[in-house]
Image (cartoon, helix red, strand yellow):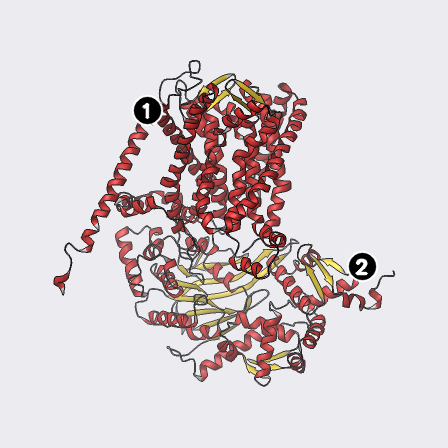
């Protein structure tokens, strides 16, 4: 059905890369093809690092694709996309303007005369349920009301395409639900001027609730992984079997391996081939404990709903537990491994030992650092050395994050220690004396 | 029930309050208008270089007029600084190539001892306005401007480049024009740092006002009607009573400007705070409350409101605040190379001319001499910072940790920091002459008079920002005094202290130019140092020596900032930030 509708925005073979430290390029997006058509809501779903925000910003004309192009109604963008308005995760309201002035700002930029501007703004404020707040400043409003201003500011411009960058993720659960429902009822009204919506989310249920099409993005670099059509009648029922089946399928897509991509085993992989999930030891231990408490098997969507975790919070923990062989993932289910069972039932000293063993063998970056330290003359190396190595495969921020995670794990495992002032990573004395004979330098 | 309503109603009764505010505001505005007209008339009196007065009358009845003339100069300089800030900072933040030149340039300019350049600027400005006092006036305003502008420009530039990314994206997507972007996003976003730095720089400007009103330059002595010239004349006459009187007027002026101008402005600027939560203790101002209650805001919006739309339309020709997504890398590279070549050529040419100039005039032997003198002045700066640290850090910590004391002390310290130290020079000089203490040592005290307050001011701010839970934790641990200082207080105030130290040291270098040669009642004391060298060269008009002196002093200041203060600051940010 959607194919018959006019194409508003075309994303044509868009790739985006940034220059790395050694002059090599770091890819964020790779060969993205996407059409936004009139009459549809498209959700971009992906884990962190999948470049979904970057993709939305190329569609908005805020950043330049390295190769490929974005066209709005056939014309290639060379600046902010004139057919779009954006709703931001952080609201992005001017704190020094009142609600009304904020809503009028875009109209003022279009050169709409003041009287007409006021009328249109008041109408938008009325539609979005902000009456009575016209003269309030954003800081006087709650998060939900602020995001309403964000919506009013975007909708008053009557854009062809409404872009939303995780618009509900800074709100509490109830407020978000309320705002989502109202947005959907607006979308359902016959004269709604906006023709299409593109929403970035890392909330799977939100994607299924709102979208006609869910585009699943894979990470490193961001690429199109799957497209899932949601053919459910609105308003959608979260409890229906069809809804739950779609949610499970999307979980499977996000946690499972991609069929045509081979990922090396953790025990073999290099630090750049298998990045460490950015997870704290406490967090992953907590997750293993929860799975243990549920008898060794748990449903991911259930855990996410119960902890009100979004996938960006939850999936790194799942990945970390799977990397260390404490859990394994089957579909949308988490299963406890024997190792995980031992880890979570042992007392603190023993569980630390188990963690250390697993991290030393199965966490590629921890293993690399440990081996390099054991082979060094003094048992210590500068963190800058590892950072330089990591920058060949990661952006500076990501490289730092990788190192921070490895240091966190290594410290907890008592494998090595780190001195912030000197930037030295030092092998733990117990491991220094116990290192394999071939590494020992003759005294 | 409705019969029990009061008559007139509460709303009607509230009006007399409004009226009172209106009357006060109206009278204030009328007085201000008269003052400006009267003062502006004084500026354009006939004047020529030869018959120009070298002193002013010390009749106390003239003092209010002089004070007002000085004040007008200060505000003129402030206005120029604001315009400069807008243009320079915006260019630096928005033009990629300009940034590479403008920011390092600003860094150097900030370190140039501007008092040393007065002889050059005065000659230039007098030539610009022949036959009128405007030349001297402009030179004085320029000197004040150079003391105010740099900090404001840096602050505004910083606010522009650190603008929240989402606000930048929102303004681009809303397709604001350059004009709209500047006035509705950039200026409001930078308002708080701009006002705060404006206030502090204005305080520092008084020093330069006093120094630039009475000058001996190129063998001439010049005086502008103003409170600085009044003190200079009274000092030369050895009339201590009149010096004291001028000091009182000065204090009234500093306090008055704070109460009537800066306090309301800082309180008003609070509305531009980007953080979602209100500041714990937002500045309040009675003056602002009176203004708000009056009809002025409504009147202003009625007058200027209708202008906004036509202005938006007209300025749309400047285009959208957007940069094209696609640029040709070749053209970009070519532009980069061209601009680099032009800049390097200019610098090279300038250097060659400068070397030639020095060789022709003072000779290169002077450079070594000046470097040596700089070392002596450097010694004074070190001594000053060390002593001020030993005295003011404990005092500042004590004040900062006692909320009641700091509420009282903060405005006092602010006035002390604004009060031009060169006003006190006559008193100290008198004491030095009477006791026979050499200015080589006394100069340290003179330089410290102005500079020390920055250390105190910042330490108070740092100490009062120490989180309460940390203090409670250390009380709970019963930290002994020594440990309490070493483990809590000193690390916590370190970064504010460094900020104060940078400013104090910079101020001390500048002050050395007026502090190493002082005179009182016809007796002149001279210290050995780079400041005296520059001052001497300025009064005799020795261009080669001025150039060498100023360049060497800039070298010292920039070098020390780079090698010492910047590193300390980076350390403070990395290790000792409390947040």
Give a yes or no on whether discs 1 and 2 share a subunit.
no
Q: Which residue position holds label 1?
A: B41
Confirm whether residue A294 shows in the render. yes
Corner quadrant of residue B129: top left
The picture quadrant where one finds residue A153 is bottom left
Q: Quadrant of the N terminus of chain A?
A: bottom left
Looking at the image, how many numbered discs can be counted on the residues? Answer: 2
Measure the C-alpha gap from mark 1 to mark 2: 81 Å
Residue B75 as seen in the image, left or right of residue A393: left
Q: What secondary structure is marked by label 1? A: helix
Q: How far across and how far down the image is residue B20, in percent?
A: 23, 44
Residue closest to the far bottom: A295
Q: Nearer the viewer, residue A124 or B250?
A: B250
Residue A377 bears which disc, if any?
A: 2
**Rendered view: A20 above or below A191:** above
* Chain of the residue displaying label 1: B
Taking the view exactly as shown, the residue that stands out farthest to the top is B50
Q: Please, is residue B185 above or below residue A400 in the view?
A: above
Give the label on residue A280, or none. Answer: none
Of B203 and B109, the residue lying toward us: B203
Query: Residue B28, how many percent across, how many down?
Result: 29, 37
x then y, percent, for residue B545: 60, 22
Which residue corresponds to the image point at 77% horizontal and 61% vertical from the top-left? Answer: A379
The answer to whether the residue labelled 1 contacts the one labelled 2, judged by CB atoms less than 8 Å apart, is no
Chain ID, mark 2: A
A53 relative to A375 in the view: left or right: left
Judging from the image, what secondary structure is the residue with disc 2 in? loop
Quadrant of the rendering where the C terminus of chain A is positioned: bottom right
Residue B86 in the image: x percent, y percent? 44, 40
């Amino acid at each position: 059905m959607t194919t018959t509708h006019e194409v508003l925005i075309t994303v044509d073979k868009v790739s985006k890369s940034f220059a790395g430290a050694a002059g090599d390029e770091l890819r964020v997006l790779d060969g993205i093809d996407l059409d936004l058509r009139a009459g549809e809501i498209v959700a971009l779903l992906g884990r962190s690092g999948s470049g979904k925000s970057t993709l939305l910003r190329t569609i908005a004309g805020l950043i330049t694709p390295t190769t490929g192009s974005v066209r709005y109604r056939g014309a290639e963008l060379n600046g902010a996309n004139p057919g779009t308005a954006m709703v931001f995760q952080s609201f992005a309201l001017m704190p020094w303007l009142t609600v009304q002035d904020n809503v009028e700002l875009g109209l003022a930029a279009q050169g709409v005369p003041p009287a007409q501007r006021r009328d249109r703004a008041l109408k938008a404020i009325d539609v979005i349920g902000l009456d009575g707040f016209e003269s309030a400043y954003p800081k006087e409003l709650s998060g939900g009301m602020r995001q309403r201003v964000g919506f009013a500011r975007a909708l008053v411009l009557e854009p062809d395409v409404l872009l939303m960058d995780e618009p509900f993720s800074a709100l509490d659960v109830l407020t978000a639900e309320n705002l989502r429902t109202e947005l959907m009822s607006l979308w359902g009204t016959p004269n709604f001027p906006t023709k299409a919506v593109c929403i970035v989310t890392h909330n799977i249920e939100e994607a299924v609730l709102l979208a006609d099409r869910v585009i699943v993005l894979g990470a490193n670099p961001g690429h199109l992984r799957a497209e899932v059509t949601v053919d459910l009648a609105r308003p959608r029922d979260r409890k229906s079997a069809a809804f739950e089946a779609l949610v499970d399928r999307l979980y499977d897509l996000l946690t499972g391996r991609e069929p045509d991509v081979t990922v090396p085993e953790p025990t073999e992989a290099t630090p750049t081939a298998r990045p460490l999930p950015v997870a704290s030891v406490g967090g992953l231990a907590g997750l293993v404990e929860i799975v243990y408490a549920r008898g060794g098997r748990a449903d991911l969507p259930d855990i996410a709903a119960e902890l009100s975790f979004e996938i960006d919070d939850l999936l790194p923990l799942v990945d970390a537990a799977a990397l260390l062989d404490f859990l394994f993932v089957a579909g949308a289910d988490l299963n406890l491994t024997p190792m995980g069972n031992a880890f979570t039932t042992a007392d603190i000293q023993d569980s630390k030992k188990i963690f250390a063993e697993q991290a030393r063998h199965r966490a590629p970056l921890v293993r690399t650092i440990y081996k390099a330290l054991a082979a060094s003359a003094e048992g210590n190396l500068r963190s800058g050395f590892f950072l330089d190595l990591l920058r060949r495969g990661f952006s500076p921020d990501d490289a730092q994050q990788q190192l921070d995670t490895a240091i966190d794990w290594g410290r907890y495992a008592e494998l090595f220690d780190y001195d912030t002032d000197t930037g030295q990573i030092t092998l733990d004395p117990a491991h220094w004396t116990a290192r394999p004979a071939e590494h020992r330098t003759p005294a | 029930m409705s019969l029990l309503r009061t008559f007139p109603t509460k709303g009607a009764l509230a009006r007399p309050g409004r009226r009172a505010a209106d009357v006060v505001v109206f009278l204030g505005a009328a007085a201000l208008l008269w003052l400006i007209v009267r003062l502006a008339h004084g500026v354009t009196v006939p004047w020529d270089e030869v018959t120009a007065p070298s002193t002013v009358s010390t009749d106390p009845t003239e003092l209010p007029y002089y004070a007002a003339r000085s004040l007008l100069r200060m505000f003129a300089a402030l206005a120029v600084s604001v315009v400069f800030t807008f243009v320079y900072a915006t260019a630096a933040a928005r033009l990629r190539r300009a940034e590479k030149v403008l920011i390092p340039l600003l860094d150097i300019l900030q370190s140039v001892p501007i008092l040393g350049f007065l002889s050059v600027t005065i000659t230039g400005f007098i030539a610009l306005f022949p036959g009128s006092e405007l030349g001297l006036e402009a030179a004085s305003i320029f000197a004040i401007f150079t003391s105010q502008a740099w900090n404001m420009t840096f602050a505004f530039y910083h606010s522009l480049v650190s603008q929240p990314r989402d606000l930048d994206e929102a303004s681009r997507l809303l397709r604001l024009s350059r004009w709209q972007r500047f006035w509705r996003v950039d200026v409001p976003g930078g308002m708080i740092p701009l006002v705060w730095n404006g206030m502090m720089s204005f305080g520092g400007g008084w020093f330069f006002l006093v120094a630039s009103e009475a000058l001996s330059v190129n063998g001439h002595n010049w005086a502008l009607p103003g409170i600085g010239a009044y003190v200079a004349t009274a000092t030369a006459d050895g009339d201590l009573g009149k010096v004291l009187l001028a000091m009182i007027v000065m204090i009234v002026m500093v306090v008055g400007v704070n109460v009537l101008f800066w306090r309301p402005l800082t309180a008003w600027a609070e509305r531009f705070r980007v953080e979602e939560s209100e500041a714990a203790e937002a500045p309040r101002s009675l003056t602002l409350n009176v203004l708000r209650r009056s009809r002025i805001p409504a009147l202003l919006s009625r007058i200027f409101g209708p202008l906004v739309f036509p202005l938006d339309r007209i300025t749309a020709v400047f285009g959208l605040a957007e940069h094209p997504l696609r640029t040709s890398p070749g053209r970009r590279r070519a532009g980069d190379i061209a601009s680099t070549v032009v800049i390097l050529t200019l610098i090279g040419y300038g250097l060659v001319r400068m070397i030639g100039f020095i060789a022709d005039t003072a000779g290169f032997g002077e450079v070594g001499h000046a470097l040596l003198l700089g070392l002596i002045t450097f010694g004074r700066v070190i001594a000053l910072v060390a002593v001020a640290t030993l005295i003011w850090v404990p005092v500042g910590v004590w004040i900062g940790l006692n909320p009641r004391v700091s509420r009282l002390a903060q405005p006092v310290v602010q006035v002390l920091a604004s009060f031009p130290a060169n006003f006190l020079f006559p008193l100290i000089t008198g004491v030095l002459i009477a006791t026979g203490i050499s200015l080589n040592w006394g100069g340290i005290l003179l330089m410290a008079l102005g500079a020390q307050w920055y250390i105190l001011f910042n330490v108070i701010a740092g100490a009062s920002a120490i989180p309460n839970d940390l203090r409670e934790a250390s009380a709970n641990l019963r930290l002994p005094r020594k440990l309490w200082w070493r483990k809590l207080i000193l690390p916590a105030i370190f970064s504010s202290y460094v900020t104060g130290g940078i400013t104090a040291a910079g101020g001390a270098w500048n002050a050395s130019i007026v502090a190493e040669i002082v005179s009182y009642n016809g007796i002149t004391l001279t210290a050995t140092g780079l400041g005296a060298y520059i001052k001497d060269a300025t009064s005799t008009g020795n261009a080669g020596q001025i150039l060498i002196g100023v360049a060497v002093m800039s070298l010292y200041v920039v070098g020390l900032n780079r090698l010492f203060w910047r590193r300390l600051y980076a350390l403070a940010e990395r290790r000792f930030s409390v947040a």
